[in-house]
Image: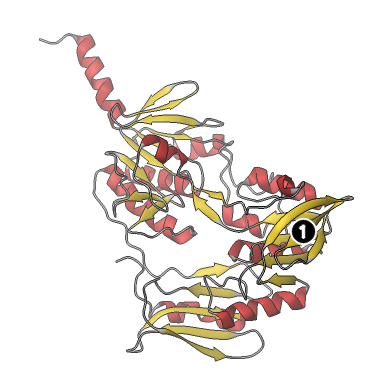
């Protein structure tokens, strides 16, 4: 007959193997913890995060100026409040240094943590343009609260702000900076802003609206150098032109954070490769959010994260559930010209049909040869038609 100590030891092992460890305290990590807690009230959940664990809406970083938000007032809850709310354990300011997928352990500088299921919610990191010049290291990017605090500090004395990158985040920041009276210049290689997301006509409508509000555009060029010039920065463009700014912000995009996945030996491509059940190439290890790639799709937006978290939670709780993505239009935070876009799939065969309404209002519908709607872009007043056209779209991932 086994001893009591042995029985307790075996029971302890079972309890440990049933726990879930989440790495990352962004939207993906906290949404998963919330969904999982609904299904498994007693399941041990531990969340590890590099920062202070404050819960905030990352998309709000690009329109926080207009709302008068600081890095201190953006968070909705502290790590301590999230611990109490979700009945989980949160370890802040902690880097994961290694994952042993055979032993089912996560290592930090302070301890080795066993897991039953492990979820990587490590997000994305900014892409830095290949700038030269003696002030290249003074170019800012905003990807978290700390970055935003640095930007807010710079804006206390900066009036002229140059944004490198005319994509979604660059345009949102441009509009936000206008709202607090800054002089804004946007630099980028495309012929119109958001040329990878919008048809040319819709991009031109957004460009025109922001230009009327005061944005100066330098398109069809790239920034090559950033140098100190007195108390400002001189930016040299690929066409030889130069411009001066008091603050330079890079918004050329994000890429999935693959560092820990590669160190662990997980399969990666553009993101951490996962199945429809969000499982990586290692048993009991999952990935969710901006870092994950599902059937070739890397979708760094709120709605895909929400749908994926709601699928992964039941899987972790014992009911295998595949993620499905419905049509998920993206809404830009550009009040100067509202924009809603649901881009067609990369391999979609069709054409854009453009209908100009009034002012900056434009309806662009992407239809196949049979007239089926595969995507749309709506600007200005037409953005209010989002629900109408969304009903006709096929799912992104059925």
Is 113 situated left or right of 158 in this image?
left
| Residue 66 visible at all | no
Judge by depth and name the residue closer to the eye, 280 or 310.
Answer: 280
Identify whether 171 is placed above or below 339. above
| Residue designated by label 1 | 235
Q: Is residue 40 left or right of residue 342?
A: left
Q: Residue furthest right?
A: 230
Seen from this angle, which residue lies furthest front?
240
Q: Residue at x 38, y 51 (%)?
A: 269
Q: Examine the image and state in which quarter residue 100 appears.
A: top left
Q: Quadrant of residue 238?
A: bottom right
For this view, does 358 lie left or right of residue 397? right
Disc 1 element: strand
151 up-or-down from 379: above or below: above
Q: Could you say where residue 295 lies in the image, as x and y percent from the top left? A: 32, 58
- Up-down relation of residue 17 to residue 252 (above or below): above
Between residues 218 and 201, which one lies in front from this camera angle?
Answer: 218
Quadrant where the C terminus sits is bottom left
Residue 298 percent coordinates (x, y): 42, 58
Q: Nearer the viewer, residue 21 or 33?
A: 21
Q: Residue at x 73, y 55 (%)?
A: 225
- Which residue corresponds to the image point at 38% horizontal and 54% vertical from the top-left? 293
The answer to whether residue 345 is seen in the rendering is: yes
């Amino acid at each position: 007959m086994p001893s009591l100590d042995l029985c307790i030891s075996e029971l302890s092992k079972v309890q440990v193997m049933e726990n879930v460890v989440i790495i990352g305290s962004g939207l993906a990590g906290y949404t998963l913890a919330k969904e999982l807690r609904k299904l498994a009230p007693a399941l041990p959940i531990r969340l590890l995060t590099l920062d202070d664990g404050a819960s905030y809406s990352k998309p709000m970083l690009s329109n926080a100026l207009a709302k008068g938000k600081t890095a201190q007032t953006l968070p909705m809850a502290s790590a301590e409040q999230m611990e109490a709310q979700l009945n989980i354990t949160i370890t802040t300011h902690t880097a994961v240094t290694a994952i042993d997928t055979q032993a089912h352990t996560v290592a930090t500088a302070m301890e080795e943590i066993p897991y039953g299921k492990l979820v990587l919610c490590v997000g994305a990191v900014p892409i830095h343009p290949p700038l030269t010049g003696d002030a290249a290291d003074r170019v800012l990017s905003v990807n978290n609260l700390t970055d935003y605090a640095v930007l807010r500090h710079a804006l206390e004395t900066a009036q002229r702000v140059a944004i490198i990158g005319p994509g979604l985040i660059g345009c949102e920041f441009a509009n936000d900076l206008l709202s607090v009276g800054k002089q804004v210049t946007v630099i980028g290689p495309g012929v119109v802003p958001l040329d990878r997301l919008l048809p040319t006509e819709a991009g031109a409508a957004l460009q025109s609206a922001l230009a009327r509000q005061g944005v100066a555009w330098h398109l069809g060029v790239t920034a090559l150098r950033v140098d100190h010039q007195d108390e400002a920065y001189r930016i040299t463009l690929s066409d030889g032109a130069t411009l001066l700014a008091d603050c330079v912000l890079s918004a050329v995009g994000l890429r999935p954070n693959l560092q820990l996945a590669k160190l662990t030996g997980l399969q990666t491509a553009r993101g951490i490769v996962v199945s429809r059940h969000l499982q990586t190439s290692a048993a009991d290890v999952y990935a969710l959010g901006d870092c994950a790639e599902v059937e070739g799709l890397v979708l760094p937006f709120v709605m895909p994260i929400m749908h994926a978290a709601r699928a992964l939670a039941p899987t972790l709780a014992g009911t295998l559930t595949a993620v499905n993505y419905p049509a998920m239009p993206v809404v830009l935070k550009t009040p100067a010209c509202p924009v809603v876009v649901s881009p067609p799939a990369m391999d979609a065969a069709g054409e854009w049909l453009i209908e100009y309404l009034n002012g900056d209002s434009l309806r662009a519908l992407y239809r196949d040869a049979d007239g089926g709607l595969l995507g749309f872009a709506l600007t200005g007043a037409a953005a209010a038609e989002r629900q109408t056209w969304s009903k006709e779209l096929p799912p992104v991932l059925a």
